[in-house]
Image (spheres, rainbow, N blue to C red):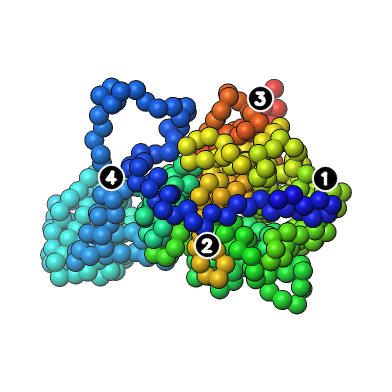
Amino acid sequence: MKITGILLFVCMLVFLAVWPEFNKSVEDRGNAHVFTRGEKTQQSGAKDAQPRMAKVNNIKMGEHIKSLLNNHEEVKLVHHNRLDKSHYYDHEVAVDFTQEPSQQELQQFCEQIGGSAVKSFNSTVIFNSPTRQTEDLLRFFSDKPNIEFAEPHYILMQNDVQLPNDVLYTEKYQWNLPAVGAEEGWAISRGSNKVTIAIVDTGVDIAHPDLKKRLVDGYNVLHTDQPPADDNGHGTHVAGIIASETNNREGIAGLTWYNKIMPVKAMGKDGYGSTFDIAKGIIWAVDHGADVINLSLGNYQPSKVLKKAVRYAYAHHVVMVAAAGNDNSSQTSFPAAYPEVMGVSAVHYNGNRADFSNHGDYIDIAAPGVYIPSTYYKQQYAALSGTSMAAPHVAALAGLILSANPELSNSDIMRIIQTSAIDLGVRGKDSDFGYGMIDIRQSLQNASKVKQPRDRIREKLDLFQRK
């Protein structure tokens, strides 16, 4: 579908009848991953030539350990927030002495608490008391002389990622999340509610159970006296890829766990909008606190109105991401082709460029865009295909990076996404995938290594002083 003049076409291919075929493809793949990072997606040789590997699901093992600890009568929990918790042994306390205690001193403490010293190392002793809970032991030791500190005897576990329990995730429909390294990336950052991602689109289903807790106030450009409700489905699908509520045992898992979504309705129920409305939506989002803007829309005709809004957003440190288009064309598409915007092509789950995806020199990065399950309007779920589905993967990654390192500029974030990508196709940047497919884990690792401006200044001062 091509819309001329000032109208923007929506980069959307809807496949509501793909579930049986997609489910079969998932079953055929079994436990194999979609890509091997750094390797080409070629078929391996003879079956007996393949290395034999033990099938160990350490994630499930970790979940089993946590379940045991959560229900153990001698283990207590510290609830840091709704999701994260720590464990410690009840009836025990770790005490560190200013000076290593004598045997007489230890014996005296054991008699007073009705317990024993079960472990010791240098100046640290673990005391156990069958009759006193940890809180009582902490109070007992808090005001004693010769004691540096007392704390619970905490339990540490291997750092496995707690995978989401959302239905469509656990049933392996969301192939796109493991493919981009989301599971490993979540061990570094799951996002922050201080970082907001605006979706300039057809609006969002405000009542959707997987989205309603993730929304901030939005704007309806078309009818300013009405909420930015979705009457098309496209915007809701884009929103779910980024921020469907994760780990709530419902629907799908979003790429971010905590980032907020700002719905900006600039396209109508037929799925298109004017450059004026899109530009107005971009500027409104910037002025109301958006850190990232997703634009799953485009047209082949450049627009000064749209370009002005894009430059305004970029000057205000906003990261912008746009879909490349779905015509299998090399024709330059806007706003994806603006240098201030990251243009995104779509990757099939076989590792190739999706056959519908546009391509060209303006492609910066690639992301999954075929049979992507997500939220849909009227409180539904649907699997859609298109570069519209690829773009929000990149917008979500930008939000995760900014959550992990809030001092980064928009140009820093764009560069990190590009330099951390999985190189697909011909070596280096190409017209199909740009710099490659996003790698969330590698991007977040690289984001944490970027020096802050103050650190850079200190390094220059140190260098100057050495001279």
Say which of 403 and 247 sits in front: 247
**Other-residue count near label 2 (Cα within 10 Å), few / some / many at <14 / 14–19 / ≥20:** many
- Coordinates of residue 403 in the picture (x, y in percent): 57, 52
How far apart, in angstroms, are the residues tagged by discs 2 and 3?
Answer: 58 Å
Vertical side of 16 occupied by 355: above or below: above
How far apart, in angstroms, are the residues tagged by discs 3 and 1?
Answer: 51 Å
Say which of 339 and 355 sits in front: 355
Residue beneath the point at 55% across and 71% down = 378
Q: Amino acid at mark 3?
A: Arg
- Coordinates of residue 142 in the picture (x, y in percent): 31, 65
Q: Which of label 3 and label 1 is nearer to you?
A: 1
Q: Dot 1 lies on which element?
A: loop
Residue beneath the point at 71% across and 35% down = 330
- Coordinates of residue 74 in the picture (x, y in percent): 19, 64
- Coordinates of residue 454 in the picture (x, y in percent): 66, 42
Q: Dot 4 lies on which element?
A: loop
Q: Amino acid at mark 1?
A: Pro
Return the mark for residue 69. none
Going from the N terminus, do you reach mark 2 or mark 3 first? 2
Give the residue pinned by disc 2. Answer: 375
Going from the N terminus, do you reach mark 2 or mark 4 first? 4
Going from the N terminus, do you reach mark 2 or mark 1 first? 1
Give the residue pinned by disc 4. Answer: 57
Q: Dot 3 lies on which element?
A: helix
How far apart, in angstroms, are the residues tagged by discs 2 and 1?
Answer: 31 Å
How far apart, in angstroms, are the residues tagged by discs 2 and 4?
Answer: 29 Å
Give the residue pinned by disc 1. Answer: 302
